[in-house]
Image: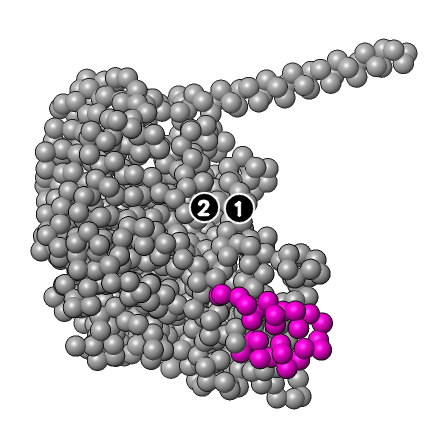
């Protein structure tokens, strides 16, 4: 009997092994089968001549065609080869259709994204450009059609196939990008709650103005709301949990003139700061036809190159941080919930019915209620007489298609500025340069001209006093051409001083990055590409240089406390660089984060404090201002009888930080290292759930930097210390020879798991490296991995 039991067990085990092995082999087969062809010839409908896609050794496509229509067809085909599921995911998000993929938990998110553009968008494309963009969609569809039986693994796991791409689908992706770059969604409603909670004096200290010594880009030459206003905040949190896309993303760019460059020609650098995800947010591409020769970084699924260079000019972007969102308190007619009061009469809302399809369930019908200001985004107040509407410039500003196309063909800074006349969305600080030696900057943003108010708090919608009177015209937006200083730098800092007649915003990033970049640009009379590399990888923390001496004083004064003397000695010799191996960086950053708790949480309470942390740019700005001032009601803990001071806050925060670090890394402070707790994992939307995290996520990797360093590696203040946001690409262009341009992505060019270019740029990115862009055809052919030729069918 025992013998038979043993035989049965062995047979079952064998079947399991065979089953698991067969499943593994099937899975590997599916992954390999979905990889695109990079060599050979294939016939397709939709082109008039030959299109060549030369892939270099990093998998970057260099596309060559005889005309722009065929070129953009190849553009669409190549992006579908590498990122088909990514672009389809963002299309679903922007169109408000994620529930079709993930079920009922995304219904609220879908409704909100449908609200965002319910009043439509402005494209204003010429017929020729409409044809070109249609060719881009046709290229995507050609790939979908020819590979419908071997799609990327995400489609298999989610059990669906992509719909055909239509010409305007890229606008859904741009909606997501614009939403992610707009700061007001995450800040205005939280600011209102904090004002109600702590009063005006503490509110102003929690949301401080730009410091007087903080650099600017262009130098000087209520009512009580009862309605629930949490929908935009809930959606932001839901999208962040899916893709890590923070509201109000940041960046660095700078450009120097020939007189500051060792080779006598301008140099330009750009590194944009977004979610550090898998696949990477950006996709590299080179486009070539008789009228276009451009290389750079595209948003997958969007037919343009917002960061890049051609043979004559280069350009880079950062977020303006413009305040392009306002919330209005609307008085609702108690007799008719579809009417609201405006000045002296009831106005009818436009009612749009939204039908949201739900995976595994019945479709959900919702109403979108539109006012003159925009959609109603909240539930009514307690008495049903009040609601909040949202006005966002996205529906009124010009989409970037025309500007992006003109940028590709610009030959000097004057043609760049002509292209930028048509760039309103997303709002960007452009720096640019040409081979003739000129450099420039233009604030390209939909800056509302407000009749009244500063845009940061909800305002009465019924009075007509807080309307927008249009947008700041192009020529009146801040700009610079060939400044005497010889360089221009932007890092999401304040654009212009208070003498400027229009309000751009309040959401500036802390002054640290731009202060450091400007300092490094000034340290040498002549700069090189190697200097630019060092600046892009710099992890010196300016705020640490200000706070650490004060922390050191507290440590020395209370040296009898456990670990304080040793911590003092470590900080006394620290160089304020947030290095992976640094013990000083550990002590500073954890103390800094504990200071946020000890300053703000007692007044705000847990829930509102968590919302404040998500405003991201304000907590460090507030702490800098409070520490410089030295005294504030915020330092006092309202839950204790005594009145705490700044010294008390620092002492408490240091003690908590040292205790937490001992628990994580042991008692030997010399062995503490920032990279042991500050790690980066590139997360895939499907990798948010186990066990798919092991399949799709890449990491963890120890990383240097923090929120405030030029080489930004930011963790969510509510979830320390796992980096999730930072440098999402790097580019350096030497205008003496644009063929020597340098690029790098955080992960790789492909989103296909089995592709050799799925993660091949990680060592470069984390190792402070770059790869050549190889924009010239001879360079691309010399370094090619394969050539795929598309022929007209």
Label drawn at residue 701: 1
Residue 145 percent location from the top left of the image: 31, 24
Residue 373 percent location from the top left of the image: 28, 66
Q: Which residue is mark 2?
A: 766
Depicted 264 relative to depicted 571: above or below: above
Could you tell me how far apart the alpha carbons at marks 1 and 2 are, in whole angstroms? 9 Å
**Residue 555 in sight here:** yes
**Residue 354 in sight here:** no
Looking at the rendered structure, the number of numbered marks drawn on it comes to 2
Q: Label 2 near label 1: C-beta < 8 Å? A: yes
Residue 621 percent location from the top left of the image: 43, 73
Highlighted range, magenta: 550-576
Taking the spot 27% from the left edge, 22% from the top edge, the residue there is 788
Report the mark closest to the observer, 1 or 2.
Answer: 2
Depicted 600 relative to depicted 13: above or below: below
Depicted 749 relative to depicted 316: above or below: above
Taking the spot 16% from the left edge, 25% from the top edge, the residue there is 47
Taking the spot 46% from the left edge, 31% from the top edge, the residue there is 753
Along the line of sight, the residue nearer the viewer: 477 or 6: 477
Taking the spot 90% from the left edge, 11% from the top edge, the residue there is 1
């Amino acid at each position: 009997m025992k013998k038979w039991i043993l035989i049965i067990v062995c047979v079952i085990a064998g079947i399991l092994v065979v089953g698991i092995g067969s499943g593994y082999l099937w899975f590997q087969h599916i992954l390999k089968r979905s990889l695109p062809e990079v060599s050979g010839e294939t016939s397709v409908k939709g082109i008039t001549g030959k299109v060549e896609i030369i892939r270099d050794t990093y998998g970057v496509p260099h596309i060559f065609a005889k005309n722009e229509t065929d070129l953009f067809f190849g553009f669409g085909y190549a992006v579908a080869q590498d990122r088909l599921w990514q672009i389809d995911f963002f299309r679903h998000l922007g169109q408000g259709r994620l529930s079709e993929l993930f079920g009922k938990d995304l219904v609220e998110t879908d409704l909100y994204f449908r609200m965002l553009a319910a009043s439509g968008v402005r494209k204003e494309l010429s017929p020729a450009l409409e044809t070109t963009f249609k060719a881009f969609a046709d290229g995507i569809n050609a790939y979908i059609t020819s590979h419908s039986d071997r799609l990327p693994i995400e489609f298999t796991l989610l059990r669906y196939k992509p719909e055909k791409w239509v010409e305007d689908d890229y606008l859904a992706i741009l909606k997501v990008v614009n939403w992610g770059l707009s700061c007001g969604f995450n800040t205005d409603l939280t600011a209102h709650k904090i004002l109600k909670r702590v009063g005006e004096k503490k509110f102003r200290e929690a949301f401080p103005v730009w410091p007087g010594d903080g650099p600017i880009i262009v130098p000087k030459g209520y009512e009580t709301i009862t309605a629930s206003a949490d929908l935009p905040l809930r959606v932001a949190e839901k999208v962040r949990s899916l893709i890590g896309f923070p509201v109000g993303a940041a960046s660095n760019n700078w450009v120097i003139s020939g007189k500051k460059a060792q080779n006598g020609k301008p140099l330009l650098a750009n590194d944009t700061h977004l979610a550090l995800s898998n696949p990477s947010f950006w996709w590299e591409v080179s486009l070539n036809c008789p009228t276009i020769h451009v290389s750079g970084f595209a948003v997958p699924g969007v037919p343009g190159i917002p960061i890049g260079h051609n043979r004559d000019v280069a350009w880079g972007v950062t977020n303006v941080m413009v305040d392009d969102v306002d919330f209005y308190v609307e008085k609702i007619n108690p007799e008719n919930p579809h009417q609201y009061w405006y000045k002296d009469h009831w106005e009818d809302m436009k009612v749009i019915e939204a039908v949201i399809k739900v995976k595994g369930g019945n479709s959900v019908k919702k109403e979108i209620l539109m006012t003159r200001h925009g959609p109603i985004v909240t539930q009514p107040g307690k008495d049903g007489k009040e609601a909040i509407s949202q006005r966002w410039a996205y529906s009124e500003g010009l989409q970037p298609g025309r500007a992006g196309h003109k940028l590709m063909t610009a030959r000097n800074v004057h043609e760049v500025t002509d292209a930028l006349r048509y760039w309103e969305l997303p709002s960007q600080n452009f720096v640019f340069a040409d081979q003739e030696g000129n450099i420039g900057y233009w604030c390209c943003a939909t800056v509302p001209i407000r009749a009244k108010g500063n845009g940061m708090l909800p305002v009465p919608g019924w009075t007509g006093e807080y309307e927008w009177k249009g947008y700041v015209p192009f020529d009146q937006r801040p700009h610079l051409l060939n400044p005497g200083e010889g360089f221009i730098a932007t890092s999401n800092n304040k654009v212009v001083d208070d003498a400027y007649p229009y309000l751009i915003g309040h959401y500036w990033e802390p002054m640290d990055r731009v202060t450091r970049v400007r300092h490094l640009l000034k340290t040498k009379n002549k700069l090189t590409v190697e200097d630019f590399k060092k600046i892009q990888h710099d992890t010196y923390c300016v705020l640490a240089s200000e706070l650490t001496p004060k922390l050191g004083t507290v440590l020395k004064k209370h040296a009898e406390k456990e670990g304080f003397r040793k911590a003092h000695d470590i900080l006394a010799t620290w160089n304020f660089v947030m290095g992976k191996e640094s013990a000083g960086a550990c002590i500073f950053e954890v103390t800094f984060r504990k200071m946020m708790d000890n300053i703000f949480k007692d007044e705000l309470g847990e829930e509102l404090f968590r919302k404040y942390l998500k405003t991201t740019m304000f907590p460090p700005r507030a702490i800098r201002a409070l520490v410089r001032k030295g005294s504030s009601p915020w330092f006092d803990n309202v839950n204790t009888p005594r009145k705490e001071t700044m010294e008390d806050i620092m002492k408490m925060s240091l003690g908590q930080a040292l205790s937490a670090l001992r628990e994580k890394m042991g008692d030997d402070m010399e062995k503490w290292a920032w990279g042991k707790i500050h790690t980066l994992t590139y997360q895939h939307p499907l990798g948010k759930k186990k066990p798919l995290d092991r399949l799709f996520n890449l990491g963890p990797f120890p990383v240097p930097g923090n929120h405030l360093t030029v080489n930004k590696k930011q963790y969510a203040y509510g979830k320390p210390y796992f980096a999730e946001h930072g440098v999402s690409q790097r580019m350096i262009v030497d205008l003496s020879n644009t063929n020597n341009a340098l690029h790098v992505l955080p992960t790789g060019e492909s989103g296909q798991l089995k592709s050799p270019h799925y993660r091949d740029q990680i060592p470069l990115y984390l190792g402070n490296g770059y790869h050549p862009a190889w924009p010239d055809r001879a360079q691309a052919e010399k370094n090619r991995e394969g050539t795929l030729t598309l022929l007209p069918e």
